[in-house]
């Protein structure tokens, strides 16, 4: 029974736009949630959507120290809310995937010697060899991607080893760019962390290892052996194995909270820290999918993913190690133009209001009278294209749409692209598939309806949209119980998802034809504007 003094399990999510935290009790009930939003709570860093897009339009970074200060702020918010730190039995967390942190020589000593009277910010100002962390939105490493595929032998060979062909945002290619362009900074780097393992390091007061699930998003890990691939390491930069440290299963306990956090906030000395993982793997744990479920995450990025028993890497999409069951995998597709693109259209066409956006969506028919829009505000991942392309019902390119048509076009265009690329990967989505929606935009009923119509399947949501942090709180509990009992046993008490949207009767017919047109249009746009 969860009484006043019962154990709590805490999950953090260091995502693109914010750090979120939630705590659950032994019954998996969420007892506290808090967040720090980077753009509004830390305006001095002048981020937009948590990031800086550089002048070349391809380089995208976030100041590493912003995440450090955001954690100070978040822990202070918890303290101000009288959060019972002393009841926390274990914590875990997640981070936006692929982003990297470059700890300077000597930083390990700084981390382990933090003084409880001072903030993280005051003590870690000078801890990073590269002050701006490359993040998942970066598209500036096409040259390094080509070099890696060539050195390994081919895109297919790289995909077969690491689960993915070379992708610009994948960490190995980002590290190669830093090694090539900032060799002094690379030399001066003691440890390279992912955003997830960096965050875990702040909690244990030492370098935390990278977990195999998030580590799969680097083009460096042999996903079957669950160890670094020597071939890939050597192809990216020298001395990389040492700078990356060991890889551990996601369920591994990597330490206990540091004495710094015990003294400053009152965490118990034996509070366990379970390896942090990627935010999408975290969501997989949080949604506890059943066989056949497909997850659509609508965070800053849109992602489509599912649980997989056997890896079959292809030239599109990614295979990651499973964060919950070490023998299994997950397959994922990521789209860069997600929430921020919808937000731009909302601001320009709906007066900045989601309510008006929804009304415009409702006022337009399924299929948008044949109008199709492709909105790549930033360079998309598949295809590697930037630009906005609108086509009327005759396939003619047009410069603009009326406001409501534009609103439907952005949502339909995004959903069709998710379906078309999921089909390329062999995802089997149909009327019997449960589509589990999560992330910030999953609170929008209009968007969920378009997903149901385009995917021709019912869309389900859970009462906690922040599934990554929730999944990490579940993972913290699972590992505290030894990690050997089935994860499904730990989450058996969690609430079942509820159906939020069912496909309209005529939707299948409309979108089967529209998706074929979308596929042709996107191929045409790629041929004309692709950056390969
Ligand atoms: N009612 C809404 N309709 C559509 N999108 C929304 C709504 N509320 C929030 N969002 C979107 O959710 C996004 C943030 O989602 P979230 O999952 O918290 O992102 P992240 O985890 O990447 O930081 C915002 O960029 C915003 O556009
Ligand atoms: O690049 C990917 C996945 O491969 C992104 O999904 C990042 O992990 C960012 O996640 P959100 O902040 O959008 O949840």
Image (spheres, rainbow, N blue to C red):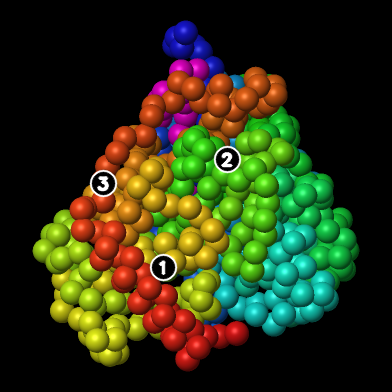
Residue 525: percent from the left, percent from the top? 44, 85
The residue that appears at 23% across and 82% down in the rendered structure is 393
**Marks 1 and 2, the one that precedes in the sequence:** 2
Answer left or right for 508 relative to 55: left
Count of numbered circles on the image: 3
Q: Which residue is mark 3?
A: 502
**Mark 1 falls on what kind of element?**
helix
Please state which of the two labelled residues, at mark 3 or mark 1, is closer to the viewer.
Answer: 3
Instruction: Please give the range of residues in magenta.
Output: 19-32
Q: Which image quarter: residue 154?
A: bottom right
The residue that appears at 75% across and 45% down in the rendered structure is 209
Vertical comparison of 133 with 326: above or below: below
Please state which of the two labelled residues, at mark 1 or mark 2, is closer to the viewer.
Answer: 1
Residue 22 lies in the magenta stretch: yes
Q: Which residue is mark 1?
A: 417
Residue 468 lies in the magenta stretch: no
Q: Which residue is mark 2?
A: 93
Residue 494 appears in the figure: yes
Residue in front for this viewpoint, 154 or 517: 517
Query: For mark 2, does the 10 Å Cα neighbourhood hold few (<14), some (14 to 19), or many (20 or more) residues?
Result: many
Vertical comparison of 309 with 161: above or below: above
Work out how far the residue at label 3 is from the one at label 1, CA to CA, in angstroms: 20 Å
Ligand 1 within 8 angstroms of badge 3 C-beta: no
Vertical comparison of 446 with 236: above or below: above
Q: Residue furthest front?
A: 509
Work out how far the residue at label 2 is from the one at label 3, CA to CA, in angstroms: 33 Å
**Marks 3 and 1, the one that precedes in the sequence:** 1
Residue in front for this viewpoint, 111 or 465: 465
Answer left or right for 421 relative to 356: right
């Amino acid at each position: 029974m969860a009484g006043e003094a019962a154990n709590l399990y805490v999950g953090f999510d260091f995502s693109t736009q914010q750090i979120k935290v939630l705590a659950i009790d032994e019954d998996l009930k969420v007892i506290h949630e808090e967040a720090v939003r980077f753009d509004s709570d830390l305006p001095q860093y002048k981020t937009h959507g948590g990031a800086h897009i550089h002048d070349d339009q391809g380089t995208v970074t976030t100041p590493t120290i912003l995440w450090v200060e955001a954690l100070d702020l978040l822990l202070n918010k918890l303290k101000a809310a009288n959060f019972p730190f002393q009841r926390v039995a274990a914590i875990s967390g997640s981070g936006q995937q692929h982003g990297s942190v470059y700890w300077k020589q000597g930083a390990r000593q700084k981390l382990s010697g933090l003084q409880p009277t001072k903030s993280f910010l005051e003590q870690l100002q000078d801890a990073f060899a590269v002050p701006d962390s490359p993040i998942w939105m970066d598209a500036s490493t096409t040259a390094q991607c080509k070099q890696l595929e060539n050195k390994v032998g081919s895109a297919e060979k790289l995909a077969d080893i690491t689960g993915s062909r070379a992708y610009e945002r994948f960490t190995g290619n980002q590290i190669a760019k830093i090694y090539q362009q900032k060799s002094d900074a690379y030399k001066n780097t003691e440890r390279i962390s992912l955003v997830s393992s960096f965050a875990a390091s702040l909690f244990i007061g030492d370098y935390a290892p990278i977990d195999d699930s998030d580590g799969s998003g680097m083009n460096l890990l042999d996903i079957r052996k669950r160890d670094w691939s020597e071939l890939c390491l050597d192809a990216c930069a020298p001395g990389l194995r040492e700078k990356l440290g060991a890889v551990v299963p996601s369920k591994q306990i990597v330490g206990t909270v540091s004495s710094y956090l015990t003294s400053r906030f009152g965490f118990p000395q034996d509070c366990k820290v379970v390896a942090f993982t990627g935010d999408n793997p975290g969501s997989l744990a949080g949604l506890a999918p059943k066989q056949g479920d497909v997850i659509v995450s609508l965070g800053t990025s849109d992602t489509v993913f599912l649980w997989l028993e056997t890896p079959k890497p292809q030239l599109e999409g990614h295979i990651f190690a499973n964060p919950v069951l070490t023998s299994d995998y997950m397959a994922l597709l990521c789209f860069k133009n997600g929430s921020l693109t919808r937000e731009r259209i909302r601001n320009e066409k709906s007066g900045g209001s989601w309510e008006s956006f929804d009304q415009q969506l409702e006022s337009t028919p399924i299929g948008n009278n044949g109008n199709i829009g492709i909105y790549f505000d930033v360079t998309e991942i598949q295809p590697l294209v930037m630009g906005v392309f609108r086509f009327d019902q005759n396939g003619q390119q047009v410069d603009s749409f009326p406001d409501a048509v534009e609103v439907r076009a952005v949502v339909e265009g995004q959903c069709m692209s998710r379906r078309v690329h999921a089909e390329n990967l062999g995802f089997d989505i149909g009327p019997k598939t449960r589509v589990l929606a999560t992330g910030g935009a999953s609170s929008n009923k209009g968007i969920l309806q378009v997903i149901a119509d385009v995917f021709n399947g019912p869309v389900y949501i859970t009462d906690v949209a922040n599934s990554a942090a929730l999944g990490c709180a579940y993972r913290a509990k699972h590992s505290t119980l030894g990690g050997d009992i089935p994860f499904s046993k730990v989450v058996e008490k969690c609430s079942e998802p509820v159906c939020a949207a069912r496909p309209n009767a005529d939707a299948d017919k409309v979108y089967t034809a529209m998706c074929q047109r979308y596929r042709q249009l996107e191929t045409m746009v790629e041929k004309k504007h692709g950056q390969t």
